[in-house]
Amino acid sequence: MKRVISYFVIVGLVLIGAVFSDTDNVLAEDSSKKEIDAVYAAQSWLSLVDSGKYSQSWEESSDLLKNAINKQAWGQTVDAVRKPLGRVISRKADSKTYMKSLPGVPDGEYVVIEFHTSFENKKSSVETVTPKLEKDGIWRVSGYFIK
């Protein structure tokens, strides 16, 4: 009888392991899709910044960014940083990380994306763009930094 119980315990553990394994795969697939959607949103938003449409980039940003800086200040700040760099020569997403918590901001769904970008006047830089999944289900940029 002990042998039968042991067998069922082992089979039960294997089945539980398979369920958790499938759950992990679903979560990984879900976060991968979210990362892809966030990268697409970031690239679309960056195209506005690249073309000097700073007001429109602010309009299409997350409420988090909008509450941190007004439209006029955003335009002046981005122009002061981006103009000296010149036009974008190339940009490639180097990394993307799905996160539910980041320092200094409310918990939510974020993807931190690092782009390796070459500008006309700065051959190598890293742009960090952080889209946030908004309540309406749309990814919007909540942070933008250049190193």
Image: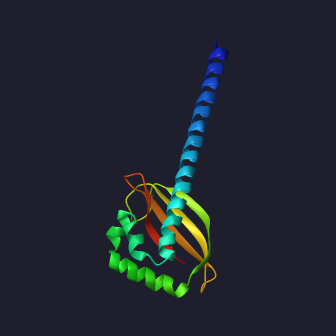
Q: Nearer the viewer, residue 97 or 50?
A: 50
Left or right, residue 11 beside residue 78 = right
Q: Is residue 145 above or below residue 1?
A: below
Q: Give the image quarter of residue 123.
A: bottom right
- The quarter of the rendered structure image containing the C terminus is bottom right
Extreme-top residue of the structure = 1
- The quarter of the rendered structure image containing the N terminus is top right
**Residue 18 position within the rendered picture, expressed as x and y whole percent measured from the top left:** 62, 33
Q: Residue at x 49, y 56 (%)?
A: 99
**Residue 139 position within the rendered picture, expressed as x and y whole percent measured from the top left:** 45, 58
**Residue 82 position within the rendered picture, expressed as x and y whole percent measured from the top left:** 50, 82
- Which colour assignment does the render follow? rainbow
Q: Is residue 118 above or below residue 136?
A: below
Q: Give the image quarter of residue 120.
A: bottom right
Q: Is residue 130 above or below residue 21?
A: below
Q: Nearer the viewer, residue 13 or 22?
A: 22
Left or right, residue 80 beside residue 71 = right
**Residue 54 position within the rendered picture, expressed as x and y whole percent measured from the top left:** 42, 76
Q: Residue at x 51, y 58 (%)?
A: 38
Q: Residue at x 61, y 23 (%)?
A: 9
How many marks the image carries: the answer is 0
Q: Nearer the viewer, residue 17 or 6?
A: 17
